[in-house]
């Protein structure tokens, strides 16, 4: 617990936000023509994806993508590589909803949305549990947001620092002494 400066968002708050987002997705996709596919951005979104997909009631399918952006420690770089792609022949029949843990510079989601539209998806929307609007380097507006948070490095509920802390059930602020 000593590496964690404070709890920013509790388990209960995350659950309520996830329920709200699931209801918004149900409302927006109930008459969708085609398949509805939640796309998990590995690895950070695993926990949020698992909880969100259980709360959505419209029938959804799932896919995973993985990107690597070169950066170190607590900053992500702008050069993005796709390590795992959505690979399905029926993509033109799919409404994709990209599920992210956090949007920071905006580079990852900008890249992914463009890539998935280029592949021929019927539509692409984005959902993020956390949004750090003050850190944006490219303009990007997500369709569904859990929480706007200040510019602090957070961990838990899937988010890591050096691959650690992903299994925590809440979102915590990492003590800056851990990375400075
Ligand atoms: P973006 O491309 O700069 O928007 O970065 C998004 C990615 O950066 C996220 O998917 C995370 O992997 C990582 N990231 C950004 N801020 C944080 C944070 O506070 N904690 C953990 N990971 C973060
Ligand atoms: Mg991530």
Image (spheres, rainbow, N blue to C red):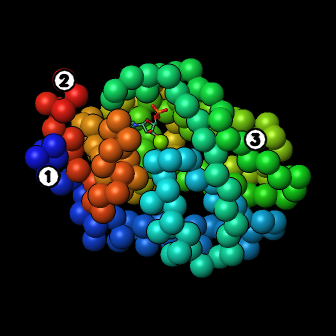
Check disc 1 and report the residue beneath it. Answer: 1
- Left or right of residue 170, residue 53 in this image: right
Closest to the observer, 85 or 107: 85
Q: Give residue 112's position: percent from left, percent from top.
A: 64, 38
The residue positioned 36% from the left and 51% from the top of the image is 166
- Can you see residue 8? yes
The residue positioned 34% from the left and 57% from the top of the image is 167
**Residue 180: image tag:** 2
Q: Give residue 153's position: percent from left, percent from top.
A: 27, 37
**Residue 117: image tag:** 3
Mark 3 and ligand 1: say if the CB distance to the nearest ligand atom is below 8 Å: no
Q: How crowded is mark 3: few (under 14 residues within 10 Å), some or many (20 or more)?
A: some
Q: Give residue 147's position: percent from left, percent from top.
A: 34, 53
Sooner in the amino-acid sequence: mark 1 or mark 2 = 1
Q: What element carries label 3?
A: helix
Sooner in the amino-acid sequence: mark 1 or mark 3 = 1
In the image, residue 56 above or below residue 158? below
Q: Give residue 123's position: percent from left, percent from top.
A: 74, 51
- Can you see residue 143? no
The residue positioned 54% from the left and 47% from the top of the image is 42
Q: Distance between the residues labelled 1 and 2?
A: 18 Å
């Amino acid at each position: 617990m000593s590496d964690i400066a404070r709890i920013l968002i509790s388990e209960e708050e995350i659950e309520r936000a996830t329920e709200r987002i699931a209801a918004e997705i149900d409302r927006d996709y109930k008459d969708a023509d085609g398949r509805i596919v939640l796309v998990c951005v590995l690895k950070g979104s695993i926990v949020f994806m698992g909880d969100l997909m259980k709360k959505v009631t419209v029938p959804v399918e799932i896919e995973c993508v993985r990107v690597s952006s070169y950066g170190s420690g607590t900053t992500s770089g702008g050069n993005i590589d796709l390590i795992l792609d959505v690979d399905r022949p029926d993509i033109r029949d799919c409404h994709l909803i990209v599920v992210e843990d956090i949007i920071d510079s905006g580079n990852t989601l900008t890249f992914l949305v463009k890539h998935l539209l280029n592949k021929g998806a019927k539509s692409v929307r984005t959902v993020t549990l956390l949004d750090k609007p003050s850190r944006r380097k490219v303009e990007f507006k997500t369709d569904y947001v859990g929480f706007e948070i200040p510019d602090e490095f957070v961990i838990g509920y899937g988010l890591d620092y050096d691959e650690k802390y992903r299994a925590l059930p809440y979102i915590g602020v990492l003590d800056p002494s851990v990375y400075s």
